[in-house]
Amino acid sequence: MATVVQKFGGTSVADAEKIRRAAGRAIKAYNEGNKVVMVCSARGKQTDELIADAHELNPNPSKREMDMLLATGEQQTVSLMAMALDAMGHKAISFNGAQIGMVTDSAHSKARIQSIDAKRVKKQLDNGHIVIVAGFQGVDEKGNVTTLGRGGSDTSAVALAVAIGADVCEIYTDVDGIYSADPRKFPDAVKLEEISYDEMLELASLGAGVMHGRSIEFGKKYHVPIRVRSSLNDNPGTLITDEVPQMEGILVSGATIQKDLAKIGLLGVDNTPGTAAQIFAHLAGANVVVNDIIQVELSPDKANLSFTISHSDLEDAKKAINEIKKEVNCQSVFVREDIAEVSAVGVGMRSHSGVANAMFNALREAEVNVDAITTSEIRISCLVNEDQAERALVAVCKAFELDKPEEERTYNEA
């Protein structure tokens, strides 16, 4: 008997009809002989509505109280799902994060999972129940409700799959799988049959909204197959799995743009050992998540250091930098909020040359100016003006033929 975790996003449980449809998928898997755990998000736009309600009463509410509030969205969904399953003739029981012992750290609004006590879930599965768990939430060691940040239900689902030894984690959403680019921005994007954990992790960190990055980290570390599927049909979707040799034949699997970014630059900081560590330790203390970092030596004594962050972290980051700038003898600080990042991702970059050249030529021909460049082993990212972002994405997609199935791309032969 296999164990399956099925995660349903907010659009997949937005109303009674969709809740019944999701329940039907769980029942189908159960009738096929599987043990089934469902992980559910808040319905539709409920999280946004709760945030709006909070800000109407307090423009700067505490993160602890926001976690208390936002966790209620998922709790409503799981209890409604249990009621639907019961009405459809199947035993079901719902739990919130605290009830299954999902223990996190105390970083409210962006908590990280530390452990899960799976005994209660396993007992109910053995008793023949379909178990429904509230995603996105946990509890810290002091008993405070915590949330994992936007997209945290993905992380809840994969972490729970690890804890109970599930054979697969299925992520149901409103799209048919993982595409070579966002179809809303590049309509000719094609669906991928499979993608490696490393590629998906890069795409998720760069703004691809289908999966949450931390969920991919769990999947990779514990080798949990993750399948992204549509909640509207029975198509197989996209499998996220371990890298296999044939994946290296594909130079670029996908491209993204990320607009919700700001760039902070510290000009003329001390060019001495420990300066960067001092700066980023202070940012970490303020719970600011830093993306790309670039440091340029100006002289033996001075350097420029810049980094990108999410807009949501901008105020905390500016406060932290103002507190530390004198200690590192920073001459001036600048902030840009009108930037975006376009990226190309593919494990084939490890074994092929010319990818960077092709990307830069595509941006040049599209008359897109590049502010900064960062790379990893399987990624090339360029900061561009926000008003040029979508033009940049289209140029990169066309350069790497992301409008064609992987086996038909002639660029892969370069």
Image (tube, helix red, strand yellow):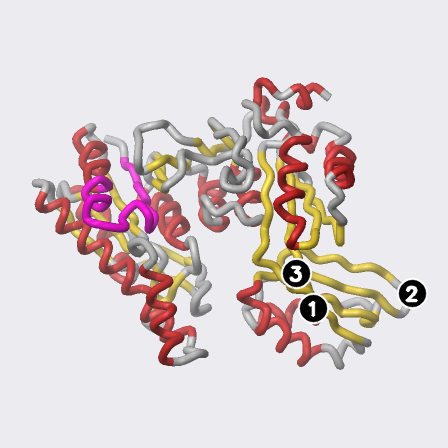
**Alpha-carbon distance for marks 3 and 2?**
29 Å
Question: In the rendered view of the protein, which quadrant contains the C terminus?
Answer: top right
Indicate the secondary structure of the residue bearing disc 1: strand
Classify 243 as above or below 19.
above
**Which residue lies under the disc numbered 1?**
335
154 vs 177, nearest the viewer: 177
Q: Which residues are magenta?
A: 3-22
**Alpha-carbon distance for marks 3 and 1?**
9 Å
Kindly check if marks 3 and 1 are in contact, taking CB atoms under 8 A apart as contact: no
Q: Residues within 10 Å of mark 2 (few under 14, many from 20)?
A: few
**Alpha-carbon distance for marks 2 and 1?**
23 Å
179 vs 362, nearest the viewer: 362
- Image point 57% across, 64% down: which residue? 311
In the image: residue 313, left or right of residue 35:
right
Residue 299 — which label? Answer: 2
- Residue 370 in the image, given as x and y percentages of width and height: 75, 49
- Residue 267 in the image, given as x and y percentages of width and height: 80, 69
Disc 2 or disc 1, which is closer to the eye?
1
Residue type at tag 2: Ser
- Residue 320 in the image, given as x and y percentages of width and height: 63, 76
In the image: residue 217, left or right of residue 302:
left
Indicate the secondary structure of the residue bearing disc 3: strand
Question: In the rendered view of the protein, which quadrant contains the N terminus?
Answer: top left
- Image point 69% across, 32% down: which residue? 350
Residue 338 — which label? Answer: 3
Q: Residues within 10 Å of mark 3 (few under 14, many from 20)?
A: some
Disc 3 or disc 1, which is closer to the eye?
3
